[in-house]
Amino acid sequence: MSDTKTAYKSASELSEETRNALGALLLALADNKRLLGIRYSDWILGAPSVEAGIACSAMAQDEWGHGRIVYSMLKDFGFDPHHLEHEREAEEYHSAGVLDSDGTSWPELIALNFLLDTALTVQFETLHESRFEPIHYKVRKLLDEERFHFEHGRGWTARLAETEAGREALAEAFGNAWTSCLAWFGPDDDAIATVLATEGIVSGDAAATRGRWLARVGPVLSAAGMDLAREDADGWVSDAEPNWSAWSTERRRVSTGGPDEDTLARVRGDRNRSLLID
Amino acid sequence: MPVLERRPRYEQGMNFAAVLRDTQGHRDDLPPPPEFDAPAADLAERARRALYEVSDPEFPISLVDLGLIYGVEADEVAGVVTVSVTFTATACPCMDFIKWDVRERLLEEPDIEEVRIEIVWDPPWTTARIPERGRDILRASGVAV
Amino acid sequence: MPDDTAPPRSPQDETLKSDVLPDSVRCPFCNLEDTEQFSTFGGQVSTSQYYCNRCRTVFDFFRWR
């Protein structure tokens, strides 16, 4: 049995199994942050109010800042940062299916803001007291910033629910995003989540972390008239069942494929490649 | 298409700090550094004082007055200065500018041959880290703290 | 001094309120605290915006405390 108290100072101190598992989780977090930033940026112009547009601008920058911090750690996990940023194909992105293409409505963006961004935040919270010290020193600042993303998603969810048309649009948008976000945590016996929880790298296994997320978003959804999650004796649960037979523990998603052509070109910076000087 | 080697821009001889300064004139509106009663006791202190001349790119306030400098250490023999710096946000769009400006200013200082910059995120920066002088500067620019 | 020529805020300007931010902060111009939240996300990634009811102006507030 391994000693679960000693802190790890670098990736090289981890066992190969743990290093691979943490590397995969960090890559998935970074890719989701990077792509979510693009989705926020889609609404800097055209959001329902000037303030909402500014919020999207700030949240896009936050996501890219968080992505940058996590990508920068991956070199120690055997990844080539240049390859990660500019040379991957769609199937090599470890991002949630709901980010594959851009949304067409503001409620869809709010679904990403409230459901997916919060899912990533809850996962980062499991790294707050991580034995892997390099991450735990970076997570606090990130979590501070995410408090405002949560408020934005919660506030807009409630605001949209004030009208009949808004409730319909919300139900459709959140319904479409739900399974992809719920699946992000993996099945109860998820291989990577289990290794990381056992090693004390993250503070909860897949079921526990999913439960924390459901408890965070459930009451707000319920108040907005959505029955995606319900509270029972064990806490907040969802009756939706992602298609786990298609689950990839590395990519943390239940669908094949990846970002569509336009999204891929943007995330890799294809159009501006010839201008890259750094 | 030429394949450009990925190196930090300042190593390619591009003075982005100067570009930023020329376009936005930031250092020109920085308040003068405080007056000190005695010369700096050592190289680390001299370096720290020099950072009163390095501006935050968004507000007319120095990195020291904004409380972003977490520590300055110096190896006096080798002339190596290590600066621990944080940023107000992980999304800070100006991180590279700030790093270039710190390096450029400190290398102007006698006895400093090398500048190392460590980025620190913990403890996170808060407004509690802004000294009284910095609060006055910000208020004068219409920013509440 | 209050600027009586500036238009008051209209009800459409109502924005989302934050539980994390203080309800009001001291205005850097008039030094009074007759202010309210205006926008969580402000002119810089580190600032939120508040509105001073006296000066009838928006100002930036560093939101990390």
Image (cartoon, helix red, strand yellow):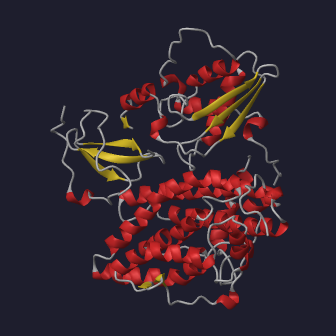
* C1 vs B34: above or below: below
Q: Quadrant of residue B108?
A: top right
* C37 vs A218: above or below: above
Q: Quadrant of residue A257?
A: bottom right
Residue B5, horizontal then vertical, whole percent: 82, 47
Side of C32 relative to A136 (left or right): left
Q: Residue drawn 69% across and 64% down?
A: A201
Which of the pair A77/A210 is nearer the observer?
A: A210
* A92 vs C35: above or below: below
Residue A104, horizontal then vertical, whole percent: 48, 75
Residue A186, horizontal then vertical, whole percent: 64, 80
Residue A164, horizontal then vertical, whole percent: 29, 82
Which of the pair B94/B138 is nearer the observer?
A: B138
Q: Quadrant of residue B101?
A: top right
Please identify the quadrant where the C terminus of chain C is shown.
top left
Q: Residue drawn 83% across and 65% down?
A: A15
Side of A2 relative to A33 (left or right): right
Q: Residue drawn 53% across and 12% down?
A: B36
